[in-house]
Amino acid sequence: MSTPLTALHFAAFNLGGTDLLAVLKSFSFEAVNEQADAGGLADRYSIHQAVKQSQKAKFTVHLPGTGGLLASNLDITLWTIGGTGYLGTIRRGVIRATTTHKDGSGIADAYAFPNATRTSVEVHTEKLIVTSAPFLDTLLTGSASSFDLTAAISFAGTAFSCPMSIQSGKHTVDRDEMQMEEVVLTLAGTPTGPSDSSLLGNMLLGTALVTLSANTGGGTYATGSGQTGLLTELTTTFQNASLIEQTGELAIQGGAAWSS
């Protein structure tokens, strides 16, 4: 009887030249063929034929903290929106960066080649209400110009800063719970940080291109020689009493390299 592979067989995970195996939580790789129906007029059944293939990898990693520990809620040192600090009342937050992209492959290319066209960012903040719901107040009584503000968040050595606009707000009251306010901010200009070599910094101020090599123990998936993948989405999640997580999606430019 054979013994199936488990996560313990995962041997290497390198993203953008950085070894992240020690902080890797999950990984998947997917290949999809675009297909055309080659069936004739009198054919009862479809005859699908591959015409182009695309591939993507998804991953979730933890962030390194200090003293050999992983980064947690305790490594968030700043959460400011519109010049007001909310670090003492934040319960959950998300920074979601997205790279809009289009296929740049030629008609005779067997593999898609996604190219970046634009970058967008959303910041979700869920906070305790101490005296009032300031974002609902702004949405209901403010003018369009009052919706524009700057969000600054510092965590585990990363300083995120962006001009943003209030998209929505929600005030929630449940029995036996504390009152909560949720606000969603969207990008309204050019980010000013992070300017480092982190995945988030690369997406916001870099090219959003990285290399990949993942040895699962049951095969290695990698970008080819001189090849890269496009970070199409990166979500950084902050939760009270939890580790900080980053979940990303990487679209391979061209055909991925694979070896057993």
Image (cartoon, rainbow, N blue to C red):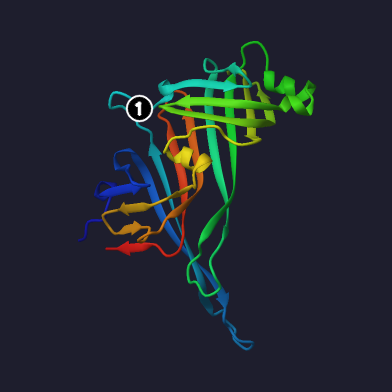
151 or 193: nearer the viewer: 193
Identity, as a three-letter code, of the amino acid under mark 1: Gly
The location of residue 75, given as percent across then percent down, is 41, 23
Asked if residue 210 can be seen in this view, the reply is yes
170 or 109: nearer the viewer: 109
Q: Quadrant of residue 197?
A: top left
Where the C terminus falls, by quadrant?
A: bottom left
Where the N terminus falls, by quadrant?
A: bottom left
SS for dot 1: loop
Q: Quadrant of residue 252?
A: bottom left
* 42 on left or right of 233: right
The location of residue 19, given as percent across then percent down, is 30, 43
Q: Residue at (32%, 42%) from the top-left corner?
A: 20
217 is higher (above) or lower (below) than 164 = below
The location of residue 79, given as percent across then percent down, is 53, 22
* 245 on left or right of 68: right
Q: Residue at (73%, 22%) from the top-left corner?
A: 138
Residue found at the very far top of the displayed protein: 131
55 or 190: nearer the viewer: 190
Q: Residue at (52%, 75%) from the top-left corner?
A: 108
57 is higher (above) or lower (below) than 68 = below
The location of residue 144, given as percent across then percent down, is 78, 29
